[in-house]
Amino acid sequence: MNRSTKLALAVALALGVAACGQKEEPKKADVKPAAPAGVTVTIAHAGPLTGSIAHLGKDDENGVALAIAQANDKKLVIDGKPVTFKMMSEDDQADPKTGTTVAQKLVDAKVAAVVGHLNSGVTIPASEIYTKAGIPVISGSATNPTLTDRGLKGVFRTVGRDDQQGPAIAAYIATELKAKKVAIIDDKTAYGEGLANEVEKFLKGAKVTIVGRERTTDKETDFKAILTKIKAKNPDVVFHGGMDATGGPMLKQARELGIKGTFSFGDGACTNEMAKLAGAAAEGLICSQAGLPAEAASADFKNAFKAKYGDIKQYAPYFYDATLTVIEAMKKANSVDPAKFTPEMYNVSFTGATGKVEFDAKGDRKEAEITIFRLQDGSIKPLAVVKNGVSSPFAAPAAPAAAPAASGAPMPPAAPTAAPAAGATDAAKKAEEPKKK
């Protein structure tokens, strides 16, 4: 073998060895783009969770919690990111000073929105802190007109106002109870005094005599001094602007003193708690709420709420809808930034637990209803609904149709038709009259 042949063989052998030493590179797996990171959005609730009206504050908190839980079940995506909502709840003790401390705490926590407070006297000063921080606040129970009359942006309510509620309950006192002499008591709070003022103004315009105007506080327990003065005036009706925690004991003491007149209250004392606090003395009281009764809330809401929390106390459906308002605005704005979604709160339109939810330029709910109740057999029962100044009898939602009877089974007899509530006939006639301008 010549030298050149040997060299050629050596080169070929070397190339073969090199080729055998090469490893096949693994194929790269297809890399999927990472899912967008989720965001957690805090919606706050603030209200009285301790003290004499904690039962109402907890009811409101439950309404907020239910709305948040249901929103999370829907796995919402806003601005391309999965959103998880959480609730931060604070106790304002129904105290204006504590309320402002709570408000600053929520601002410092950078919550996206506040659903609260319960009391007008707490909501009004707290709302100024939220507004300065650019955080919207929406109450499901604060009724004093001042809340939305100051021109502050980002302040809302899902219930009616006291200049709607006051005339409604006062009209019932004047026309249905046919009162000639009325005594008025208030608890010196923004809510209690404000509502009492509206009732007094309407009654005076209706030529009803105000035989006394007394004042107490929302912490008082002994009312015998002012009640003794009122007894001497022998009023047909006594109206109290305040909460059930004071209204119940007041009514009980009034009956013990022998006051015979009908007692009437605004929404703060329009609860079943009155029967517990006043006992038999509560029977027959008249009261109003700045919204529709719990019976009129949507079936979906009532079923979900009862399964999780039990019976509705009062304004839980309105706090639920207040929370939905915030979430709907976020969806419309495609943002969880308060600066971007707050303007959209004025533009939301949806059907919630309490009916159609829309707001005017002030942040007040459009087409707000007021309901008149009587406490009977230990619980408040709706008599009439007032909307746009027109009263009509309350019609309870129809019960679900019963399942068909099994073949050959006898059908149960039809239930007797219930008699109309007192005053309902007159209210129905008024509803048919043309509305006066």
Image: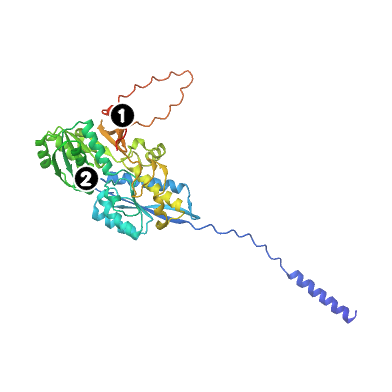
Who's the residue at 49% across and 20% down the image? 407
Question: Counting other residues with Cα less than 10 Å from the Cα at mark 1, is it few (<14), some (14-19), or many (20 or more)?
Answer: some
Report the disc number at residue 374: none
Among the 4 quarters of the image, the one containing residue 206: top left
| Kind of residue at disc 2 | Gly
Q: Specify the amino acid type for callout 1.
A: Ala
Point 26% across, 51% down: residue: 122
The secondary element bearing badge 1 is classed as: helix
| Residue depth check, mark 1 versus mark 2: number of the one nearer the observer | 1
Point out the image quarter for the N terminus.
bottom right
Q: Name the foreground residue: 227 vs 159.
A: 159
Is tag 1's residue or tag 2's residue first in the polypeptide sequence? 2
Q: Which residue is mark 2?
A: 192
State the image quarter where residue 353 is shown: top left
In this figure, which residue is indicated by the disc labeled 1? Answer: 428
Q: Does 413 appear above or below 50?
A: above
Residue sitting nearer the eye, 424 or 3: 424
